[in-house]
Structure formats: C-alpha cells, structure tokens
Amino acid sequence: MKIKITLFFTFGMVLTAFLSILGCKVSQAVVPEGNGMGRVDSLLHLMTLDEKIGQLTLFTSDWVVTGPTMRDSYKEDIKSGRVGSIFNAHTADYTCELQRISVEETRLGIPLLFGYDVIHGYKTIFPISLGEAASWDLKSIEKSARVAADEASSAGLHWTFAPMVDIARDPRWGRVSEGAGEDVYYAKLVAEARVRGFQGNDLRAPNTVIACAKHYAAYGAAQAGRDYHTVDISERTLREIYLPPFKAAQEAGVKTFMTSFNELNGVPASGNKMLLTDILRDEWGFDGFVVTDYTSINEMVDHGNVADEKEAGELSFTSGVDMDMQGAVYYNYLAQSVAEGKVTVEQIDRAVRRILTIKEALGLFDDPYRYCHPSRQAATLLSDKNLAFAREVARKSIVLLKNKNKVLPVDRNKKIALIGPLGNAQYELLGSWHGAGDAKDCVTPLTGLQAQTTAEITYVKGCDLNSEDRSGFAEATEAANAADIVVLAIGEGADMSGEAASRSEIGLPGVQLELAKEMIKTGKPVIVILMNGRPMAIPWLAENADGILETWFLGSQAGNAIADVLFGAYNPSGKLPVTFPRNVGQVPIFYYMKNTGRPMDPNDKYTSKYLDVDNSPLYPFGFGLSYTTFNYTDLKVNKPVFKVSDEITVSVKVTNTGNYDGEEVVQLYIRDLVGSVTRPVRELKAFEKVFIEKGKSKTVSFVLTAEDFKFFDIDMKYTTEPGDFEIFVGTNSDASLSKKIKLVD
Ligand code: NOJ
C-alpha cells in the first residue's frame, strides 16, 4: 500500500502504532513538515525498530576502501531503510543517485547522511595536517578546512571524518601525519580552527559539513608506535595530554566524535563508558552523536573483553556509541538485544534522535538534494582561487631546517640537478588520506622549478623510494657534476604514513641515504627537499647537507610552493609542530618532558641520559629557520608577583637583523618550578606569528591569566597552585630568554 500524507507531531504520534501494524509503504512526503525537534520527534514515532537501527548504521559504498571489510549489498540496505548514512560515496551525481533511493524508495523517505575522509582537502589538496600545522597560522588552517568543506559539500558530502585531534609523540606511529603534532596547547587551537572551518557558523549553509573529532581517545599513545596497539596511561596523562584537544573541539561545537581502535587501560574505546558517557556526555555536555571507527565494535571480540559480536554491540551501545560504522553489529543484533531487554527502546530513541537532529540541522529534511548540484561542483573543485590558496598554505608549511653558508635561496640562473625519487612523483605529493585528490593535479618539484627559471634543470631519479637498486647512482652523479647545485628530493612515500603505516626505523627508506652520500661526494652544494609524514631521524643529512627544507607532503601545489621558497619568492616561516629525534632509540622524545630526579649532567654518570646519544633532539619542537635572522631582547613582565585574578603582560622586542623581510613565530613557554605533582620543563602557552621588515623591530605582547597556570594537582583538581614560575620567550622550545614570576594567594 502506498499512501501520501503530511504529518504533524501529535498526529504522527497517533498514527505510529497504526502505521507499524499496517507496515505501510509510504512515499517521501512522509517526512513531517515543520522543523527542529518537533519534526524529529514526530518522525521517531513513525519508525519501526529496524528503521531506527538503520539510522544507527553507517556503511561504506564500494567506491573507496578505507578499511578491511566491504559490503556489496549497501544499495539494498538503503532501499530497505536499514542504513541511514553512507561513507566513501561522493560526487554530486553519485550521492544524488543514492539519496534518491533513500528518499523515494524507502517507507519513510529519511535522507541519507554522506561522510568521507576529507582530511586535508577534497579535490584541491592542502599539505597533510601535520605539515599544515607547521604554518602556525590558525587563520589559514581554518580557511583551508573551510575550502575543503566547500569543495566536499559541492560533491554531495555532509560530513567529514576530521579533524584528527590525537596528540602524537611517537614518530613511529604513521598517524602522526594526520594531526597537529605533539603539543597540547597548540593542538587545541588547531582543533578549534579546523572545526570552525569545516562547520562554519551555519550548518544549513550548503557549503558547510559537520566535523568529527577523532579518534577518541588516546589513540596516539599506542605502545611502541604500532598502530591499533594497546594504550595504558595514567588518568593524569589522559586528562592532561590526550583529552584537551577533544574537549576543545567539543567546545568549538563539533557535531560528532569518532571512537578509536585502541583499548585504554583494559577497556576498548568503543565500549568505554568512562570515555563515552561519563566524560564526553556528563562532564563535557556533548550533544552530537558518536560513531565508531570502522569495525571497532566487532574488534572487541579480538580485544577479548566480550565473548561475541552481540555482546560487543550491547557494550558499545550502552557505553555511548550511537552509530556503528561498517561493522553491521547493530544491524545484525541490536533488535535481538532489545527483545532480550539488554538495550531499551528509550536508549535507541535517544541515539536516533541525536542523528536525526543533525540531519535536520543540515537542512536535509527540507531538501535532501541540496548538496547534489553538479554545476556547483564543477565551479568549485580545483578553482583558481582554491589552488592559489593551496599554494599559499603549502609554502607557509615548509620548514627551513638548515641553511649552511646561505645556500638558500638559490639564484635562478644556477644550473640545477634535481635528483631523487620524489623529484617528479605526483602521487606521493598527495600524502595519506587525500580525499578525492588526483595525482595528475599535483605540481611536482620538477614542474614547479621549471616554471620559475629558464636555467637548465636536469632531472635524474637516482633510486627508488624503497629498494636496494643502486643502478641509477651513476647517472645522478653525472648530472650533479654537470650542475651548479644539487636539489635532492628524498624521503618517504605517501603511503608510508597514515593509518596502518607504522615504521620501526624512521630514517630514509631504501638506498636514499646512500644516494645522498653520493651527491655530497660530488662537492656541489646539496639542498635536500625532504618529504615525509612523520619526524624523521636524519642526523647524517643534518650534519652534511648544505640546506634542508622540510616539505612534508604539500598537496596539489607542492612544486610551486617549493619553487617559491627555493628561489626566494617566499621566505620560509614554518616551525616544527613536533620534535625530530636523533635516532629511534630516543623515542618518545618531546619538549614537554619532566626534569627527573637526576637531570642530565655530562660529567656525572649517574644522571638521566644515554651512553650513545645526546638527550637533545635533532631539531626541537617549534624550530624553523628563515632567510633572515631575528634577535630577541627586552623581555618584560608587568607583574612579577601576581594573583589569580590578575592579567600578566609579557612583552619582548623582536628585531629582524638579516637581509630579508620575514615572518617569525614568537613563542612563550612556562615552567612551574614547584608543584604538588611534578611539572614539565616547558609548556607552550602563547605564540604569535609576526611579519617584520628587514632592519625593523616589533614589540610582541602576550597576556596570560590564571588559566594558563592551571594543571591537575595531586587530587586531580584542575587548579592553580601558588609558587614560582619561569617564563621563556624565543624562537623555539629551547628559548633561553627568561623571567621569574610568582603567583601568590
Ligand atoms: C579508519 C580510520 O581510522 C579513520 O580515521 C577513518 O575516518 C575511517 N577508517 C573511515 O575511513
């Protein structure tokens, strides 16, 4: 039977039982008119249990594989109302085709929600998230998420599985590439910027998408940096290090959270009530919905905290997971769990309401096809404006690690030998999780350099990214000998970081270091263009190369951005958002370390150090050079003794003492000298990126409040303690200019 009706809230309630008993087949007009919760509630009253569970189910289409399982029946599932959201389906045409099935061929016509991993761009690809974080430019980070949302929504998408806000302090873990690095304060700001960028300030606007804070929680603390591995950390570390960026995302209004694959102290995140209900809902007041990461409900069987998938579903659902991504556990077992009284209909309704509320907020009930306009898609993707912005972001993300004898910038008339497996490799520039990015749209270093010089450029690959083949060395050496300068594009491939891409060695793969040695042997100046998704241990290069540019994976405009920096059209301003170790044995190494009871003393054997390597990193957090130099003087604090209610102003004079105009990221760190629990030797508390003309100075001021001095005390209370602090201001986390201040009761 097919009937066409318009329902109001109360009328809908009356009809609920009636429709269910009849099992009516009704057309799309059944989605009640009106708006907001009235419509959601009235819809809820019309839904059968299976339809409700459908809203709690998310399946992948067969367009992209982002996990180990696939389902070929997703279209039938849509038709039967048993799946309410789809991921990995994109483009205006395809999402429209699937939406039509849901709206026109299901009993209630509830529109689908389309999700996708738009991590650092949809079609116009920006630098990988870690690389972009090296820009320390929050406005630009927000804008790139805005552009990504504009492109993604023009291709039919409503929901991105980003930002990834996991703190990552272990470079072996491949997913370090997807976040903002190691620091809590900075990661919070980046998380907020990305949420604001994706979601804008009006979800009904057709160019915004809902964001997803992932992977909740502590995924980055995987033992030994091995992906999906066990996490066992103290509550203090959880609350002080891993949770704050999630809380910041929540406070910025993020609409969804994704659970992580790991267990946390014995309880897998997807069945972790403490994380999902006690903290997320009760403490923080999150009112969006929670989705699992892929089949992480099913994976609890392998974790070993449940006996079977049905039990896994019950634990997950009652712990606070609303939507099951791809695992089909809710789909297969939740109705049975309701029949057995393990899960209540009220609980199901609450989860369904959360999801329908978001569909409502996106305007999907008013117009399910509002994101499906091929003409808007064509005008939006890879537009000149977006590409120009991607180039700007890319060059801001480059970090100058070394510049011996001012080898950079390079004179455009110099004859260049471009050597290395990454010199002309379009695909690699995309980095991991590159959305719908297409390798053919990427500008390589070769094409980027060629566009900015008429001098001769010879390109020789020299070796593969990761093989033992040295047969290309001779040709590379010949090209280097014939050139004025060698530009060596080496590093990792795009797929060597990201999910399921942990490495136990974090040096250059294959014979690339040997190739670098061959190049240095020629005696020509060698500038390394490093590409990578993680901090790498490159001590030999740091010692022997003349110049090193850390370029991460810069995306669509990589080659143009690299050429801008190489030839000096842009003065590099990036700073590392993560520490670079000297070797893998130092890992984990990050600036926010504790002092220990036996701080390192080179003259005392019984102090905290290694026999075979220095304690210091190769490059510290916040490090990055410029073609100019900056001098810091006149550090001043207006209130050396302050009260909790006071504002403290810290100012410093920064002078551009070199020959180029340039930007500097002025960084402020504190150290709490005595606490009821020990505190790290440095904590970033403020920064500002300033442009200073050559020869000129700027006074940069920061305002600190009591909030900046709070921590979890011995009773796990987030508070301040009176006492002495030291403030450091400078160009990276090693800043030595300092002042002591005192907090009094
Ligand atoms: C698994 C990844 O861990 C997660 O980050 C991603 O969003 C989902 N798969 C969906 O592709």
Image: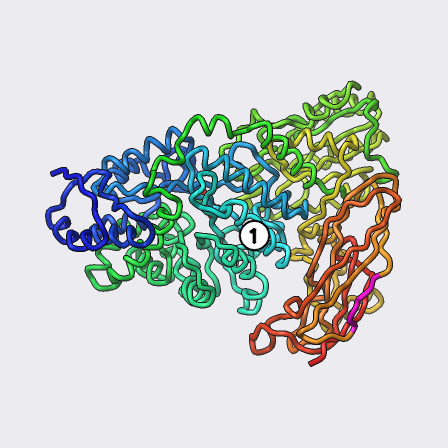
Magenta run includes residue 525: no
Residue sitting nearer the eye, 638 or 541: 638
Residue 471 visible, this angle: no
The location of residue 433, given as percent across then percent down, is: 52, 39
Q: Quadrant of residue 701?
A: bottom right
Q: Is residue 706 left or right of residue 343?
A: right
In the rendered structure, which segment of residues is drawn in magenta?
635-640
Residue wearing tag 1: 191
The location of residue 606, given as percent across then percent down, is: 77, 70
Residue sitting nearer the eye, 193 or 535: 193
Q: Seen from this angle, which residue lies furthest bottom? A: 745
Identified by mark 1, the residue type is: Ala
Name the quadrant of the C terminus. bottom right
Q: How is the image coloured?
A: rainbow
* Residue 718 higher or lower than 655, as above or below: below
* Residue 127 higher or lower than 248, as above or below: above
Residue under the point 15% across and 50% down: 20
The location of residue 190, given as percent across then percent down, is: 60, 51
Residue under the point 13% across and 46% down: 23
Q: Is residue 515 left or right of residue 325?
A: right
Q: Quadrant of residue 482?
A: top right
Residue 688 visible, this angle: yes
